[in-house]
Amino acid sequence: MRIAIIGQQDFGKAVLEAFLARGDTVAGVFCKPEKPGEKPDALRAAAEAAGLKVFQLPSLKSPEAEAALRDLNVDLGIMAYVLQFAPQSFVGIPKHGTIQYHPSLLPKYRGPSSINWPIARGDSETGLTIFRPTDGLDEGPVILQKRCPIGPDDTLGDVYFKHLFPQGVAAMLEAADLVVAGKHTEVVQEESQASYEGWFKAEESKINWANHVDQVYNLIRACNPAPGAWCELGGVKVSIYDCRKHPVRTFGAVRGKPGEIVQVTEQSLFIYAQGGTIEVLRLKPEGGKKMEAGEFARSQGLQPASEKKSAG
């Protein structure tokens, strides 16, 4: 088949390489222009290395974008991780229209941070959807879905790189074949089951140690490796990455108040939250590099709250 790919970054690159590897014709690639100082986009670099036409247009709503896609005369448009808005006047140009990838089981978790939110909420399952893009964000009819588990200790990195990334690339190929062959179905999303969540950024990633330890643990998992759940320790802003959860079973086992450091070991430090402690294994101080939490505690002279009180 003859296709155009609209996307960016590593996922867009992987989708491009998958279509090329099986012999499809990629007539052209559309990707967002890099900002000043930004490193070259992975999809753009791969497309140029393969000798393909690359279009970096400030907007896909422009007459220039529509003319470029029309001139390519493609069977199908493939949207692989797209942050630019693509109107119906653009996505409807290919002979069989356009399909888009989204890393959640639509209609749940519409929006730009759809991998973070289900982990932060403690869901045990997520998945991906290939759908028809409409002018509503992630609201078009569903063509194909794949499910994947979220293990109790899985991070965002685990869910994406072990499941949603490779399964998503394969699903794009499968859905493209179905659509071009006319063997696909399009299922309207059930609005009563829909949800929309916005970006998962700094405010959403701030740790509130007064929350239950399960919530804190889920938040840290949902932000690992990005954007990094954060708090202040000894007056230093740190992002917490690898950690373990330790429930408290009895009142007598409680050793501190929410947010207090209750233990420091060679490799880690323990912080109390409601219902248990988080053993922090790796963190990154603002402006620094990732390091063992125990090493950070020693460098900052951090001690368990009980020792501070007894020393005072």
Image: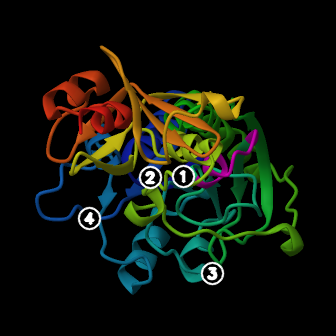
Q: Quadrant of residue 262?
A: top left
- Location of mark 4 (residue): 33
- Location of mark 3 (residue): 135
Q: Amino acid at mark 2?
A: Ala
Q: On the rendered structure, is 49 left or right of 189?
A: left
Q: Position of residue 303 (x, y in %)?
A: 28, 31
Q: Is residue 121 magenta?
A: yes
Spatial distance from mark 2 to mark 3, Cα to Cα? 25 Å
* Residue drawn at x 76%, y 39% as measured from the top left: 124
Q: Amino acid at mark 4?
A: Pro
Q: Which numbered disc flags the more N-terminal residue, 2 or 4?
A: 2
Q: Residue at the far bottom: name it.
A: 63
Depth check, mark 1 against mark 3: the one in front is 3
Quarter holding the C terminus?
A: top left
- Location of mark 1 (residue): 3
Number of numbered discs overlaid on the protein picture: 4
* Residue drawn at x 49%, y 66% as measured from the top left: 199
